[in-house]
Image (tube, grey):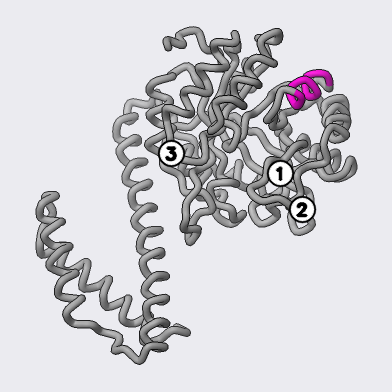
Amino acid sequence: MEMTDLRPFVDGELLRRPIVIAGPCSAETERQTLDTARQLSDIGIKIFRAGIWKPRTKPGNFEGVGSIGLRWLRKVKAETGMLTATEVATKSHVAAALRAGVDILWIGARTTANPFAVSEIAEALRPYPETPVIVKNPLAPDLEAWIGAFERLYSAGIRRLGAVHRGFSSFDHDIYRNPPDWRVPIELHRRLPGLPLLADPSHITGRSSMVPIVAQEAMDLGFDGLMIESHINPECAWSDKQQQLTPQELKSLLDSLTLRDSKMPSEMLEQLRARIDRLDGELVRTLASRMQVSEEIGSYKRSAGMAVVQQGRYRALMEERIEQATRLGLSEEFMRDIFQRIHAESVRLQLNPDH
């Protein structure tokens, strides 16, 4: 489907890079919602987000305050002038949010993965074609499912659209809560160039300490903006407290961001350097993950009474990795040196579990 007349979900000054959507994971109480909004407004945030209905992985977790929270969003808008945004997963959510004057709707990862749910939302929005909608990627790295969600909205007449990369679900959670695969949103942007592209470092990382790192990475990759969870008191948050920033922490993050001007003559060099920075980051995180596994292996060996160094395994690993590297055009000497150092560090960690 050709979608040549897409429009950004915001316009005017709000389109200035980076677009920032911030607010708590969940609207919990009127006071928490309004106090957080006031502080975010004070640091210059123009779009306030808060979950009213929370689709959760398991039953028993906090699933949102429901429609009463929409009254609080209305008060946020009246007092601060900020636009408001919330997640919708059903046609009844759409109807209630629009009645309450919510400015921007977003479709979450679990809903994006369900064509029937997206179609229901699209049909509910058909009478309101000017409603801005942003769509998070599905839980799995399925580009066609993501594009399919936009096509369903487009078919219902919705043109003011945006995309959010929030990472993908993974069996392992050693570094990220939802590891990013930047290739997917970049390809989405190539195929739908009129679509503003935001990153959600809160859900990607799952840890507030890593949010600034991934936020900068997204900016280096040319993303248009960020959706970040911010709570007046994260330690007391009813959901996802470990990944939320205080408004002042968010201000520090935004003040520290480096925004590269794509119109500069060195655009190509900057893009290449950004790729190097991203790859180096991936290397560091991969090495950290490998060392964590080495520590687990060391624990198993100790409990099983096994020697730390297994010479047969080491020789086979070295031969296989060097063969693989040479096929990819890398120097045998270079790779031998690297894997000897990696192996030595793995042995050190296994011999010194308390390091």
Q: Can residue 13 be seen at all in this image of the molecule?
A: no
Q: Residues within 10 Å of mark 2 (few under 14, many from 20)?
A: some
**Disc ID at residue 237:** 2
- Looking at the picture, which amino acid does disc 1 mark? Cys
Q: Which mark is residue 147?
A: none
Residue type pointed to by label 3: Pro
Q: CA distance from mark 3 to mark 1?
A: 23 Å
Q: Please tell me whether residue 192 belongs to the stretch shown in magenta.
A: no
N-terminal of the two: label 3 or label 1?
Answer: 1
Query: Residue 143 appears in which quarter of the rendering?
Result: top left
The tally of labels here is: 3
Q: Is mark 2 in CB contact (under 8 Å) with mark 3? A: no
Q: Are marks 3 and 1 in contact (CB under 8 Å)?
A: no
Is residue 97 covered in magenta?
A: yes
| Residue marked by disc 1 | 25
For the residue carrying disc 3, how many other residues have a C-alpha within 10 Å: few (<14), some (14-19), or many (20+)?
A: some
List the residue tagged with mark 3: 141
What's the residue at 60%, 12% (across, down)?
A: 158
Q: Residue furthest front?
A: 116
Image quadrant where one finds the C terminus? bottom left
- Viewer-proximal residue, 286 or 13? 286
Which residues are drawn in magenta? 92-99
Q: Earlier in the sequence, mark 2 or mark 3?
A: 3
